[in-house]
Each structure stands twice: as structure tokens, then as C-alpha cells.
Image: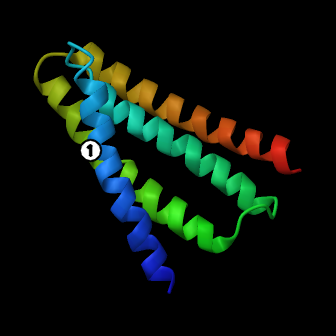
Amino acid sequence: MNWLLVIIGAAVGAPLRYLTDRAVQSRHDTVFPWGTFTVNVSGCLVLGLLTGAVAAGAASSHLQLLLGTGLCGALTTYSTFGYETLRLAEGGARFSAAANAVASVGAGLGAAYAGVALAEALWS
């Protein structure tokens, strides 16, 4: 049954990732990958909140499989982040590549921390 929860979450997360990426990127006339940045940071926030909720006993392990492994696993994308960063560097946009790497990691960690802190404030 656990695998079905992961599949259902991923079936929602993958199209959500694509649609969010396209919607965000279409609003920016720049080489910086704002769409990927947005889905990755959003996924970190959701996963942090969910992890904090599970740790506080406010969410079940089944919800963690559905939303954490399934939805967030399909929503976020380390491979695209890596590819886009490499593409920026190879294309001569080294500052944008470095900014993408630093901002993505920093914002992702910050969002995960904020999600856990929010969960603790709500359920502890």
C-alpha cells in the first residue's frame, strides 16, 4: 500500500512541477532558472513543514509517504538544478551559475528550516 501513496503523490507532483516551472519562467526574461528555483525552494518548505508535523505527531507516516516522498520527490529536481547551473556556466553566465548554486542551496535550507520551525510553532 505504501508504494501506491508514493505513486499518487508523484502523479500530482510531476505535473505540478512542470506547470509551475513554465508559469514562473514565462514571467522572467532572463537566463536564470527561476522556475526550477521556485519548485525546489517550495518543495523544501513543504518537506520541512511535513517533517516537523510528523515529528510532533500531527501527521502520519502515510502522509509523509504521500506528500514527502511522492509529491515533493516529483516536484523538486536536483538533476535539473545541476544541468541548468552547468548550462549557465558553459554559456558564459558564470555569475548566474554561481548565484543559482548559492541561492538554491541557501534558500532551500532556509525554507526547510522555516517549515520545521513553523511546524514546531503550530504543533508543539
Q: Is residue 33 visible?
A: no
Q: Residue at x 82, y 44 (%)?
A: 122
Q: Residues within 10 Å of mark 1 (few under 14, many from 20)?
A: some
Q: Check the image and report above or below for 21 versus 7.
A: above
116, 98: nearer the viewer: 116
Q: Secondary structure at mark 1?
A: helix
Which residue is disc 1 drawn over?
A: 18
Left or right: where does residue 73 sit relative to residue 34? right
Q: Quadrant of residue 104?
A: top left
Q: How is the image coloured?
A: rainbow
Q: Check the image and report above or below for 83 versus 15.
A: above
In the rendered image, residue 112, in percent from the top left (x then y), is placed at 61, 41
Q: Residue at x 26, y 44 (%)?
A: 18
In the rendered image, residue 53, in percent from the top left (x then y), is placed at 73, 56
Left or right: where does residue 96 sit relative to residue 37? left
Q: Check the image and report above or below for 111 versus 80.
A: above
Left or right: where does residue 111 sit relative to residue 19? right
Q: Seen from this angle, which residue lies furthest left?
A: 91
Left or right: where does residue 111 sit relative to residue 29? right
In the rendered image, residue 49, in percent from the top left (x then y), is placed at 66, 47
- Amino acid type, residue under disc 1 in the picture: Tyr
Q: Quadrant of residue 64?
A: bottom right
Q: How many marks?
A: 1
